[in-house]
Image (spheres, rainbow, N blue to C red):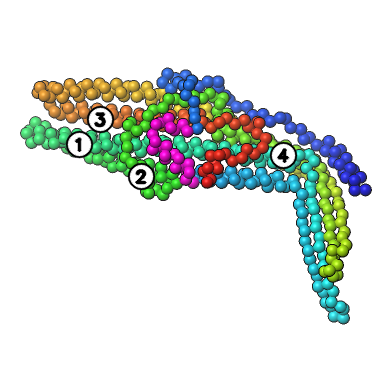
Amino acid sequence: MLRRQCVVAGLCAAVLGGCADVSMQPYQRPEAPMKTAWTERQEAAVSPTATVTLDWWREFRDPYLDSLITRSIQNNLDLRILAARIQVASSQIGEVRASALPTLDAGAGASFEKSTGRKFSKDFNLGTQVNWEIDVWGKAQRGVQAQTAQYRATEADWRAGYLNLVAGVATTYFQILQLDQQIEQQKRTLEKSREILVTYEAMHRSGLLPNTRVLQQRAEINRLSNDALELARGRELAGNALATLLGVPAGEFRVPVGFLQEKVQLPPVPAGLPAELLKRRPDVVAAEFRVLEGYNMVGQAKLAQLPSISLTGRGGTSSFALTDLLKSFTFGILPSINIPIFDPGVKARIKTTEAQTKVVEEEYRRTVIGALEEVENALVNLDAHKKQRVELQQQIDNLQVVAAQIRAQVKEGVVSQLEVFETERSLLGAQLALLANHQQILSDTVTLYKALGGGWPPVEVAAASGASGITEAANQNEK
């Protein structure tokens, strides 16, 4: 009899299921504007041999930078939060999978009653109930696939956060070293300006120079002193920002004084093709996994139109005496079918999930477009700053020749010492500009490494069919 009921229920479900549209096209990556190659630039051509490695920052050849990045990966709080979110998403996969398993409830009870004129009565009972909604159509499995895609997106978010952290530590460190070198050169400029002031004051006392030139030089020293204070302030703020990236309270960490041009080398431009961004850049990968999640959510919503079949089993015993409780049992099995195709909420859910999927598809396209812009901008900046570096170096070379000739002319009495001061001050200004250019090229290179995906291995989103496990790097960070 029970078997016949199950067969009838199954046949009814099949007939009613044939009335619902549950068809789904195979998943495909959303179409997005793409280019086949980066714009060729003379000074920022992508190297055909240099490839982006996962520890790309070692190309700068600075062991202290390596130690800072290692420390930040271990202690940065934002990265820890992202790692914790991976754990949450992983647990949610198990939660969704558990919803398709049978549930067992068990209970025991006793009642005692005494009424006037009646004997004291006792009643003991023990019962269990098993509920199971059979996943005939794979609706629960679709939910698992959707949650798995969300988990993989969260993994990619961690990788993107990792990449942003490493880039932030590197650029902030470069800024600190640049400020150290600027502060040192500012001191030299102030010394030269004070020497000029002493000369101006002597010439004024001799009646060879008006007092206005002396006042102008004093004002220049005031300006340079103010600039020195501003550089020191900027150095402190950059140090605080780096401390936060390292997970250290601001003010409790300080980078030793160092000079950027001496400590950090300019690495070659890394390689990478536009099409590789879709598989390597963590933010693009995360955006596509969210599209895959939406795709599976639509599939699950469509399957919800189909009838659901449930089995409920009950069993138990009762007795007036506790010793007789286990002598007799009653049990029963009740199959049931639920037909939600007539529920307007089911149709509305399909439209909602389809609309949400459209949103994440457009967000994916926006992410791709933004990634292409970041790479192109990094190449433009790198090309321009490298060309400027050539001009600045030539300017310095010319000023050095002029300074040497003027010093020789001073010995011969042809020109005054003032011309030497002015030439050396111009030379210091050009050297500061070259220092700033060096820092810009380093930052451009970091931005390019980051924009190209930072050396993360390619990910095939379409081939993702299950949880991959938390990334090893994320596990290390959590530890």
Residue 58 placement: quadrant: top left
Name the mark on residue 477: none
Badge 2 crowding class, 10 Å Cα cut-off, few under 14, some 14 to 19, many 20 or more, is some
Residue at 65 percent across and 34 percent down: it is 464
Q: Residue furthest right?
A: 1
Q: In front: mark 4 or mark 3? A: 4
Counting residues from the N terminus, which is met first, the one under dot 4 or under dot 2? 4
* Kind of residue indicated by mark 1: Glu
- Asked whether 88 or 350 is in front, the reply is 88
Residue 227 in percent (x, y) is at 28, 39
Secondary structure under badge 3?
A: helix
Badge 1 crowding class, 10 Å Cα cut-off, few under 14, some 14 to 19, many 20 or more, is few
Which residue lies under the disc numbered 3?
Answer: 428
Badge 3 crowding class, 10 Å Cα cut-off, few under 14, some 14 to 19, many 20 or more, is some
Name the mark on residue 142: 4
Q: Which residue lies furthest to the bottom in this view?
A: 117
Counting residues from the N terminus, which is met first, the one under dot 2 or under dot 3? 2
For marks 2 and 3, give the CA distance: 27 Å
For marks 4 and 3, give the CA distance: 67 Å
Q: Does the magenta stretch include residue 121?
A: no
* Mark 2 touches mark 1? (CB < 8 Å): no
Residue 159 in percent (x, y) is at 54, 37
Which residue lies under the disc numbered 1?
Answer: 191
* Kind of residue indicated by mark 4: Arg
Name the mark on residue 254: 2
Q: Give the range drawn in magenta.
A: 55-77
Tell me: 432 left or right of 211. right
Residue 268 placement: quadrant: top left
For marks 4 and 2, give the CA distance: 52 Å
For marks 1 and 4, give the CA distance: 73 Å
Residue 300 in percent (x, y) is at 73, 39
